[in-house]
Image: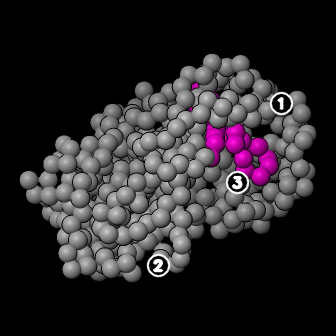
């Protein structure tokens, strides 16, 4: 079997399906292939926090601004994929009050809506909050359900002409005269795919796919654990107001609460050890803010691998807000091939738009990005969103308690 397309997108996480949707809306013929179910990598194994930017306000103001902007975009276009909870950055008795003041000042400088409240006021919002919570910052964090988001995005891409194949791993990329001439795709597709351009959006596997084209994409991979507990009394997202560390985020879902996370280097995204001590540490650290979760039943635990880029030198990446790299491999001798490395769920649409811009520049397509203004498929119909999750095989552990 042979398949021909203008653009082949490899990777069916939030960024990959975002690229496919963006290109389809611009009238570009696009095929997306994914080795397993959609969102089965990093996207579907997150805690589902929709960042307001406050987490990065003092360390990376540019990233914070991008998060705030994309937070607002997703609220507008993603409807039932998003739950508007608000968020609190909680400062406990042992936490540095100077850091609290620095965080607030940085949020104000980045135009992130922020309000300081005392511990008593915070406990009115979260009755089970720790007794030694002395102060908190209110920020517009929210929750995003990755399975719904991925399914709605890919459905909209397909509505505009994209073709998506799941359980279709790329087995080889064929490079000839400085271009990717095609890909051998196995699994359910079992075909040779020819494309004018190939986008590598495979997350933690970006280095492995790039190597098939003879390109070096050095990765920095870290694993993290998430624990979902049987606790439904939390209103806002809780963040520990300290330098980011293990176990400093508590995310409310509808019937459960997700505790996270850790960060431990790994070499292989498919083969890594897990450690019970990380689970225990995550629960204990989160319980410092919300003691009630310490005794709550752990409903399920899952691990994810974050894809980080570890360049040894400047490799031609395009600077885009957020911790991700968009690598045009023309500088590596492969003209029609690019890799996206890093990024996060909140800014996935922005990442995808940057990649689509690069592809359209190469193809000579003049159409502008429209993904920030057009609602996703079935965005305001949670029941239909869940049908799309089932239809596209996008059920993942991050929000299995919400997706019916």
Residue 400 in the figure: left or right of residue 72: left
- Residue 130 is tagged as 1
Q: Residue at position x 26%, y 43% from top?
A: 167
Asked if labels 3 and 1 touch by Cβ distance under 8 angstroms, the answer is no
Disc 3: which residue: 55
Q: In the structure shown, which secondary structural element does the residue marked by tag 3 occupy? A: helix
User: Is there any visible trace of residue 369 in the rendered image?
Assistant: no
Quarter location, residue 98: bottom right
Q: What range of the chain is rendered magenta? A: 240-263
Q: How far apart are marks 1 and 3 (CA)?
A: 21 Å
Prevailing secondary structure of the magenta residues: loop
Q: Which percent across, then down, holds residue 253?
A: 58, 32
Q: Distance between the residues labelled 3 and 2?
A: 28 Å
Query: Tag 3 or tag 1, which sits nearer the N-term?
Result: 3
Disc 2: which residue: 316
Asked if labels 2 and 3 touch by Cβ distance under 8 angstroms, the answer is no
Quarter location, residue 293: top right
Query: Tag 2 or tag 3, which sits nearer the N-term?
Result: 3
Front residue of this view, candidates 17 and 199: 199
Find out whether residue 243 is within the magenta segment.
yes
Count residues near mark 3 (Cα–Cα under 10 Å), then give few for <14, some for 14-19, many for 20+.
many
Q: Residue at position x 70%, y 33% from top?
A: 281
Front residue of this view, candidates 87 and 240: 240
**Which residue lies most toward the left here?**
1
Q: Residue at position x 37%, y 58% from top?
A: 208
Count residues near mark 1 (Cα–Cα under 10 Å), then give few for <14, some for 14-19, many for 20+.
many
Asked if labels 2 and 1 touch by Cβ distance under 8 angstroms, the answer is no
């Amino acid at each position: 079997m042979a398949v021909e397309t203008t653009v082949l997108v490899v990777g069916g996480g939030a960024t990959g399906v975002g690229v496919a949707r963006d290109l389809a809306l611009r009238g570009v013929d696009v095929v997306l292939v994914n080795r397993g179910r959609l969102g089965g990598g990093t996207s579907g194994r997150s805690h589902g926090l929709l960042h307001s930017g406050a987490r990065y306000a003092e360390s990376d103001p540019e990233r914070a601004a991008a998060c705030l902007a994309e937070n607002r975009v997703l609220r507008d276009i993603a409807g039932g994929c998003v739950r508007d909870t608000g968020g609190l950055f909680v400062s406990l008795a042992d936490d540095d009050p100077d850091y609290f003041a620095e965080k607030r000042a940085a949020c104000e400088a980045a135009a992130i809506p922020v309000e300081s409240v005392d511990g008593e006021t915070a406990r009115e919002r979260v009755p089970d909050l720790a007794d030694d919570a002395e102060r908190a910052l209110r920020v517009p964090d929210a929750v995003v359900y990755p399975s719904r988001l991925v399914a709605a995005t890919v459905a909209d891409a397909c509505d505009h002409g994209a073709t998506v194949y799941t359980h279709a791993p790329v087995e080889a990329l064929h490079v000839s005269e400085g271009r990717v001439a095609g890909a051998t795709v196995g699994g359910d597709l079992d075909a040779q795919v020819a494309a004018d351009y190939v986008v590598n959006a495979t997350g933690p596997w970006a280095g492995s796919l790039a190597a098939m084209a003879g390109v070096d994409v050095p990765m920095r991979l870290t694993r993290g654990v998430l624990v979902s507990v049987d606790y439904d009394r939390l209103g806002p997202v809780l963040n520990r107001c300290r330098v980011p560390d293990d176990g400093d985020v508590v995310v409310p879902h509808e019937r459960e609460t997700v505790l996270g996370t850790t960060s431990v280097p790994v070499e292989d995204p498919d083969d890594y050890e897990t450690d019970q001590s990380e689970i225990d540490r995550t629960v204990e650290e989160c319980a410092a803010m919300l003691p009630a979760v310490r005794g709550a039943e752990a409903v399920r635990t899952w691990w994810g691998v974050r894809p980080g880029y570890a360049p040894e030198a400047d490799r031609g990446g395009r600077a885009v807000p957020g911790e991700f790299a968009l690598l045009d491999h023309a500088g590596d001798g492969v003209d029609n091939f690019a890799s996206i490395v890093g990024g996060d769920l909140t800014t996935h649409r922005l990442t995808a738009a940057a990649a689509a811009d690069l592809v359209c520049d190469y193809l000579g397509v003049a159409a502008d990005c429209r993904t920030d203004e057009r609602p996703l498929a079935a965005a305001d119909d949670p029941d239909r969103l869940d049908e799309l999750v089932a239809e596209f095989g996008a059920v993942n552990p991050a929000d299995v308690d919400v997706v019916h």
